[in-house]
Amino acid sequence: MARTVAVIGGGISGLAAAWELTRPGAEVHVTLLEGSDRVGGKLRLEDVGGARIDVGAESVLARRPEALTLFEELGVADRTTHPAAVGASIVSRGVRWPMPRGTVMGVPSDPESVRGLLDDDEVQRLIEEVVDGPRAGDLSVGDLVDARLGPAVTDRLVEPLLAGVYAGHAREISVEQAVPSLAAAARQGRRLSDVAREAVAAAASGPMAALPVFATLVGGLGSLPEVLHARLTEAGCEVRTGTVVRALEADGTGWLVSSGPTTAVRREHFDDVVLATPAAPTSRLLRHVAPAAAAALAAVEYASMAIITLALDGPVPPQLDGSGFLVPPTEPLTIKASTFSSSKWPWLARAHPDRTYLRASVGRHREEASLQRSDPELVEVALADLRTVLGDALADPAAAHVQRWGGGLPQYAVGHRTRLAPTRDLPPGLALCGAAYDGVGIPACIASGRAAARDVLTRVETARTPLG
């Protein structure tokens, strides 16, 4: 008889775990339980001005294999597409500057590449990197860069890039987790600029050099969960949306999972459970069965953000002359970035030649006040900031959409890896996955989900092996 496995959480991590569990030969019956009305988590399509487009994550890192491998397995690799060869920019002192090439999370490999974006004194401070010997232990990305290269590099280069990934602050985010190569340089007492140069050289000559950095699917990355849902159902996985899991308890031979409305709670036995929920709900479910892990997860903070998508009538206007721009927190703007979607993604421009799509993001960790506006107010704020950067000639939108991601991005505070050590020592039959652990990007979440599933399958195989 097949063992039963519950996957709790239907974001991309949970979907990847369920997919791995339903692979041929796995011999398990999988039930995926998702509290919202759809699977996909931060991968989502919505209709904006007559087109279904991404209102969450829009691309994957193509130089990691996990997402592209999943595309192949699902039979959608022929829909893989890449951004146009147009550059991004950074706003500094009210001016858009080309995004410097050859940086490691904003740390330049060539100081001259950032002259203008940084003033002459700031560039000179960068050139005169201060190395005070090896540094043991974790520290924040910003504290390391401040001490080595000067705060201007942190404020105007590192901050906007890290905010795009974590919606957080460079002086609070763990360098060990966010930029391991810089953490290694700190431990070894090496120059950060040397590490950046080596990384750029390796990327230019390595096996991935010819590959684009990012990829998506024609039709939007938000179509990936839809495909996964269909394929999982075909493979015999039971997918239940609108199913809130309320409790988890050991029953001697496995786990009892309680789900559903409080007036009609459903209690089911599963041999194994994969928890693919964010840190806070995972902590609540583990409170009585793994209290140390629950306490560690309860301390993980999250950032909230919103994506404001605008649809303009007509083809791409001339001021949308790249893929978009990033905004350092030193600038007097509310938005932290904008993507010129129709310029960045050729498939979107071809599909909708008479419409131009762009989007802006609002919200950083502990700056929820910027989100305490109505949807129309957020649209007004975003449009005003866009006109500040791009010029008043930017037309009024024909349609707009606001997607709020409350508690959307985990914050990897200094010491994150050590703090979460208890989550790697769980009772048999439990596995964890998701963005809270080892990476917030889509490929990292896919890897996390599949690794959790393999842990379960190893346990299943061990249970089948006769003693002696």
Image: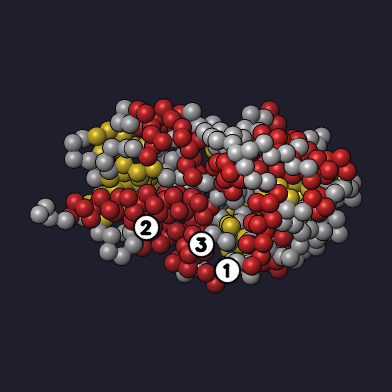
Which comes before the other along the chain, label 2 or label 3?
2
Q: Secondary structure at mark 3?
A: loop
Which residue is denoted by mark 3 in the rendering?
65
Disc nearest the viewer among 2 and 3: 3
State left or right for residue 56 relative to residue 73.
right
Q: Residue at x 89, y 46 (%)?
A: 392
Which residue is denoted by mark 2 in the rendering?
20
> Local crowd at mark 1 within 10 Å, few (<14), some, or many (≥20)?
few
Which residue is denoted by mark 1 in the rendering?
207
> Local crowd at mark 2 within 10 Å, few (<14), some, or many (≥20)?
many
Q: CA distance from mark 1 to mark 2?
A: 27 Å
Where residue 449 appears, as percent x and y from the top left, is: 42, 50
Where residue 446 appears, as percent x and y from the top left, is: 47, 53
In the picture, the disc for residue 280 is: none
Q: Secondary structure at mark 2?
A: helix
Disc nearest the viewer among 1 and 3: 1
- Name the quadrant containing residue 169: top right
Name which residue type carries label 1: Pro
Q: Are marks 1 and 2 in contact (CB under 8 Å)?
A: no
Q: Quadrant of the C terminus?
A: bottom left
